[in-house]
Every structure is written in structure tokens, then in C-alpha cells.
Amino acid sequence: MSALVLDGLTKRYGSFTAVHGASLRIPHGQFVCLLGPSGCGKTTLMRMIAGLEEPSGGRLLIDDGDITTTPAHKRDFGMVFQSLALFPHLTAGENIAYPLRIRGVPAAERRRKAESLLELVRLPGMGDRPVSRLSGGQRQRVAIARALALEPKLFLLDEPLSALDAKLREAMQIELKQLQRRLGITTIVVTHDQREALTMADLVVVMSEGQIRQAAPPMEVYRRPADAFVADFIGMTNLLEGDVTAPGRLSVPGGELALEGLPRQGRALLSVRPEEVLLHPATTPGGANRLSGTLSFVRDLGASVEFRIEVAGREIVALTRPQDRPAVEPGGAVTVEIPAGACVVLPAEGQAAGERPS
Amino acid sequence: MIRRAPRSLAEHAPILFPALMLIVFFVIPFGLMIAVSVARRIPGGFYEPDFVFANYERFLTAFFGGVLSFSLELAALVAAVAVGIGFPFTYRLARLPRAAQVRWLVFLLSILSLSEVIIGFAWSTLLSRTAGITNLLVAVGLMAEPQSLSPSFGALLAGMVYQAFPYTVLVLYPALARLDPALVEASRTLGASPVKAFFTVVVPSQRNTIVATLIMAFVFALGSYLLPQLLGRPQHWTLSVLITDQAIYQSNMPFAAAMAVFLVLVSLALVGLALLAGRKEEA
């Protein structure tokens, strides 16, 4: 099966390394999200894939052919730019037909193709509109249709939905995913929005400081983050650090936890999702994996309730359904239970989490 | 914000000053020129107020018709060459690193400080037989002996393009600096080579800027009267040269004024036509 292979792609600007040895295999038909905070190198990586940026090192292969040095206009990849880059001097239909015009397709066929693409993105009959008279969402669709006009081998989108308002954005995410599934086209989207990545992707590639931290299906990235950065960036998490005192026992501030998968000795870092943390009244007898703390803040989010509990000077966040809400007021004592199965043991670097303000 | 049309004198105040300046420095002198253009010349003397069209009738001769059409063609050619070179130049310039852009712009601005006289003499030296560039060609063996390239039509064109070029770049620069680089990148990913992207995206998307720059360079070149005398032969003398000649050396103010009025009207008509053509295509 055909695939896109990134083999140690690197981009350096002077002494600054924007992308550091990115290696990845993307099977045909996958929807991939490059996810990370701004400045992590995700856009540079996509621009290298598109041929708009020349790699300083590494190779790029598609269907086992090396395209590292192939110019952008010979790659047959469709790309949607963050600014959309619709040509202001052309109508919506002419924009979509532009790649066909470049290839010398006759005018009548161009018009027919443009109309069918407009239907694909649900803008039938809008072909004669000047770009300046389209709404944000409509422009978005025209840009998508234009990028798909040549039936590209690869569909690239650089923060395509960032200009849209929240509601339209969610709707477009679902629509884009459905479109991709229907066409079966290999798609790569750059985004800094983890909800967007989780909604659309088959494969989430989390990047930070020019490096790929983890590439895995969305739920795996969420449930088994590869390191503290990924755990913290995808959703909310509690990072607990402690010393291994005995096999399978970890001493953390405020108590001791029993769990599997710990190193034999030394320090260990845990990630525990807030929704996995259980709360009990302070009168509950202590036991395994139970820590006592003080409830410092309650945030009622409607669909769920968020609790912030201070345990031995550190804050632990717990998320419960409204009906499971314990009868404790802020300032009251509470017992926190961290089930052994909820803990993900991370490589104990610690610095990745420490650097990020929470 | 006031959205209705201004009514009282106070509401008109912000435009009073510019309007006054326009009247004092443009409308009144132009009116005077029109008045002089219909005055009657006293041979051997000056002129006295009258209302005759004799001065305009003289245009209908083949000589003045020829000079007028040569002036318009020359100005159009200068504008076309200046924009033809200036547009790709400015496009590349706007994509250079900031520091390099500043250096180029300062250099171009410094050319603006040169007067027409200096430009004219510099080019006539550069194109002369004794000290010109043909000596270089002889030195590298491309030519048998040095030649004089000036005065000639080519020399005149080179000098006038040189003079119009910095203005052209400075007018094009803001629009091209604002051009979204993603437009060209998009056209690249859609299958256009860099050259094709330039002609199918950059040039058409900047059409209004190009038309405006062409008009500016055309009007600018139309007023040139020293370079045709320094770098051209008498058959390359423009209407501006004849106006100067009539006004200063022949003391024929009414005829000079009539030619000037006529030149202004013809250029206004041409600019109007260009704008009209542009608007029609857009609609």
C-alpha cells in the first residue's frame, strides 16, 4: 500500500532548528493532525511536505519514490493555506478551476469540473461570485474545493479553520472529516487545537520544540501519553512526582500509592486524568491510594463539576458528573482516591512539565 | 461620526484649507493659462487680452500633429518600459530581507534627488564615443572601435526610463509589499511554475496598481523637456520642448499656453480612457 514516509526531516534556519529529525510513516487514506503549541515546528514540517520549504536534512518519500527535492508544482499535493490564499482577481469558480487552467484543460470542462466541486463542498451555483462577496465559511469551502480540483495524492491544510467562529468551526471539523472519509484521500492538518485534532484525526502527531513527541491514534494519545508534555498538552491532567520506596509503591506528597509499571527505584512521574480521580468524604477510612486534602475551589461546568483539592501543598484536579458530587463545601476536608489503573507512568524527565505554566 | 452630508460652514472647515490651496496653486494658474492661450500676440512685442482661436488652429498643421503624437508615444513607451522593468524588480525587492530592502529604497530615493540636467549629461557621457560604454566593449573585444550612441532615440529612451524608474518602484512598492506570499505559494502547489505563478497570479491580482503606475509614469514622462534636447535629435523633441521654445525663446506666450492647455486636455482624456477601460473590465 502506498504511504508517505518522513525520514529524519530537519529544517534549520541559521543556528535555530525549527524541525528536528521528524520521522513518520503515514499509510494511505489516513487523516493526520500535526498538533502542538505555536512555534513547535508543525507548520514548517507541513511546508516541507508541500515543497515550499527545502529540508536541511532527511528525506521525504511517497509510494517509495524520493520527492525530497521535487519542486512544489510537480508534487500534485493540494494545500489549503491559513490565509486561504484565494486569488482576489478571480471568481469562486475560476479559483477552483485555476489548477485545471494551468494544466491546459479546455474551458468547458473546467466549468463543469468547478461546478461539481462546488457541489462537493455544498456551494452549488456560487461559481460566478467574486471572492470578496463570500462569507468566511464559504471562502473556506472554495479553498478546499480548489485544493481538491486535481484529485491530489495528498491533501494538506494549515490551520484551515482558525479564522472561523467556534460554532462554524465545530461544524466544519465534522464536515471535513466526512469529506475526507468519502474521498479516501490522505490528509494532513496542522492545528494547535487539541479538540480539533481529537475530532478529526486517525493519527495525532504531537510536536513540541521541533520534535515529534508522540504519533498515535487520538484515544491512545489521550490515555497513554508518551511523556509529560503530551499528557499536559492533550486535555487536562494531574502530574504527580514521587520516589519509589518499595517495588510497586510510590511515595508522593501527602501519601503513598500502590501501582504497577513503576521503575525499580528512583523518581517516577505519573499522569492521572481528572475524570479518573475519585472523591470521598473525609470520614471515609483511609486506605490504598487515598490521600487527604482540603477542597479549595469548585467550578460547576454544567455537564461536569471540577474540584481543585490541595494535597500536601500541591493541587489535584478532579472532575465528576453532577450527580456524583460529594457533599463537601470549599474549605472542607476531603479524601482523594487515585485508582492504580488510572495512573500512567511517564519517563521521569520532569522538566517538560515543569517548564509549562499550568 | 457625522454620516450625512456637511451643511454649515463649520462642517466644511476640514476641507477648506486644501480646497483653498488647490484654487490658489492650480485652478487660478490654469485659468490664467487658458486666458493667455486665447490672447492675441503682438508681433515683436508681448500679447494683449482677446478671444481668438488662432493659436489653437496652428496645431492642425502636420508638424504639430506629428510632434504631439510623438510626445504621446514616447511617454507611453517610457511608461511601459519603466513598469515592465519596475514591476518584476519591485516584486523581488519586496521579498528581500528587511535590511536589503531599506538599502535599495534609500538608493532609489537618492536617484530622485538628481536633477534632469545631471541625468541628461551623465547619460550623454556614458553613451559618448570618447568616454562611453562602447570603450568597455572594445576593451573586452566585442567591438572594433568605440562608437557614439548619443544623441539617438535609444539614448533618449534610456535616460527617460532611468528618470521614471524610481518613481515607478516607489508607487508599486506598497502594494507589492502587502501582497500575501501565500498567493504565490498556493499557485505553486496548484501546479504553476514560479514564472507561471508570476504571470497568472501576481500580475493579474495587481492590475489596478499597474494601471495607476502606468498613468503616473506616462504623465511624468510627458512633462520631460530637457532630456529630449540632451539625448535626442531634433526629430525627438517633444511638445514640452516646443512649449519651452515658444514661451522663452520666441516670446510667443499665447501659442505656448495654447499648446500647454492642449497637452493637459489630451493627457486627461487618455488617463480618463485608461481608467474607464479598467472599470469596464472589472464590472
Image (cartoon, coloured by chain):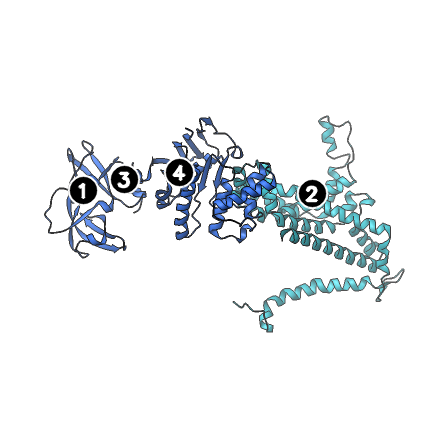
In whole angstroms, how far apart are the C-alphas of marks 2 and 1? 78 Å
Disc 4 to disc 1: CB gap under 8 Å? no
| Residue B276 image position (x, y, % from top left) | 68, 54
From the viewer's perspective, is residue A24 above or below residue B247?
above
Q: Is residue A260 above or below residue B77?
A: above
Q: Of the residues shown, which amino acid type is indicated by label 3?
A: Arg
Cβ atoms at labels 2 and 4 below 8 Å apart: no
Q: Amino acid at mark 2?
A: Val
Q: Callout 4: few (<14), some (14-19), or many (20+) C-alpha neighbours within 10 Å?
A: many
Pointer 4 residue: A31
Which is more N-terminal, label 1 or label 3? 3
Query: Badge 2 sits on which subunit?
Result: B
- Residue where numbered disc 1 is placed: A339
Q: Residues within 10 Å of mark 1 (few under 14, many from 20)?
A: some
Nearer the observer: mark 2 or 4; the answer is: 4
Q: Position of residue B45 (x, y in %)?
A: 88, 61
The image's mark for residue B81 is: 2
Cα–Cα gap, marks 4 and 1:
34 Å
Query: Do marks 4 and 3 share a chain?
Result: yes
| Kind of residue sitting beneath label 1 | Pro
Of label 4 and label 1, which has the lower sequence position? 4
Q: Where is residue A202, by image quadrant?
A: top left
